Image (tube, rainbow, N blue to C red):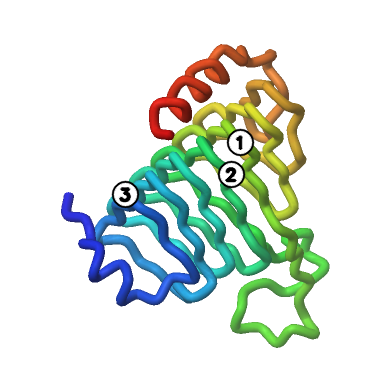
């Protein structure tokens, strides 16, 4: 895997870009002027970043993932997206009452446009899909191959299609976060 060097990252024209940022040279980036990236961020091969995206600190976006931020996506510190995870902040209505896809005139479509938020320590497992308007509350963990259509509870584990709460999640990692942040001061 090859990562873009600092000079190449700056040439892309991000809204802002922090330190220790590793973005694969095989990543597709659209509208970089709308994308903010914090410190200690890694984006792996074959990812797509498109639209209004804010990526905090200590974040990993794994291979083949896609963030479609037409209505905005915010990933707070220590959140992550595992391989083949997809986040949509815009989606067509698939009920059959409307036509779908961006090539159809707007008057025949119904599009849901709502920001998606990953609060601190939210993780999304491999192959999962996050739909428009979802807020993954602090400490949420989403199991692999889940579809999240509704906002979650804090410090909970969700699995399935549609995703349902399985159990509470431990908060022990907050002590590790505290130690890490003290070390880097």
- The residue located at (35%, 52%) in the rendering is 19
**Image quarter for residue 17?**
bottom left
**Image quarter for residue 169?**
top right
- The residue located at (82%, 67%) in the rendering is 97
Q: Is residue 78 left or right of residue 149?
A: left
First of labels 2, 1 by sequence position: 2
Disc 3 element: loop
CA distance for labels 2 and 3: 17 Å
Q: Quadrant of the C terminus?
A: top left
CA distance for labels 1 and 3: 19 Å
First of labels 1, 3 by sequence position: 3
The image's mark for residue 154 is none
Where residue 175 appears, as percent x and y from the top left, is 54, 16
Q: Which residue is identified by label 1?
A: 120
Callout 1–callout 3 Cβ contact below 8 Å = no
Q: Is residue 12 left or right of residue 2?
A: right
- Asked if 78 appears above or below 9 in the picture, the reply is above
Q: Which residue is identified by label 2?
A: 76
Q: Which residue is identified by label 3?
A: 20
Where residue 94 appears, as percent x and y from the top left, is 72, 60
Callout 2–callout 1 Cβ contact below 8 Å = yes
First of labels 2, 3 by sequence position: 3
- Decide which of 5, 29 is in the foreground and name it: 5
Name the outermost residue toward the front: 185
Disc 2 element: loop
Where residue 31 appears, as percent x and y from the top left, is 48, 76
- Asked if 109 appears above or below 95 in the picture, the reply is below
CA distance for labels 2 and 1: 5 Å
Q: Nearer the viewer, mark 2 or mark 3?
A: 3
Badge 1: few (under 14), some or many (20 or more) residues near its Cα, within 10 Å? many
Badge 3: few (under 14), some or many (20 or more) residues near its Cα, within 10 Å? some
């Amino acid at each position: 895997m090859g990562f873009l060097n600092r000079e190449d990252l700056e040439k892309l024209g991000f809204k802002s870009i922090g330190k220790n940022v590793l973005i694969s040279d095989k990543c597709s980036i659209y509208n970089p002027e709308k994308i903010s990236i914090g410190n200690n961020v890694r984006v792996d091969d074959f990812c797509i970043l498109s639209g209004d995206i804010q990526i905090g600190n200590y974040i990993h976006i794994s291979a083949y993932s896609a963030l479609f931020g037409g209505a905005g996506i915010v990933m707070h510190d220590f959140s992550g997206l595992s391989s083949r995870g997809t986040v949509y902040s815009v989606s067509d209505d698939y009920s059959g009452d409307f036509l779908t896809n961006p090539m159809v005139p707007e008057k025949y479509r119904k599009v849901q446009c709502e920001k998606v938020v990953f609060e601190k320590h939210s993780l999304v497992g491999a192959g999962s899909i996050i739909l428009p308007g979802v807020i993954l509350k602090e400490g949420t963990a989403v199991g692999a191959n889940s579809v999240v259509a509704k906002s979650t509870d804090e410090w909970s584990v969700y699995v399935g299609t549609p995703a349902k709460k399985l159990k509470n999640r431990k908060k022990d990692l907050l002590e590790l976060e505290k130690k890490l942040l003290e070390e880097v001061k």
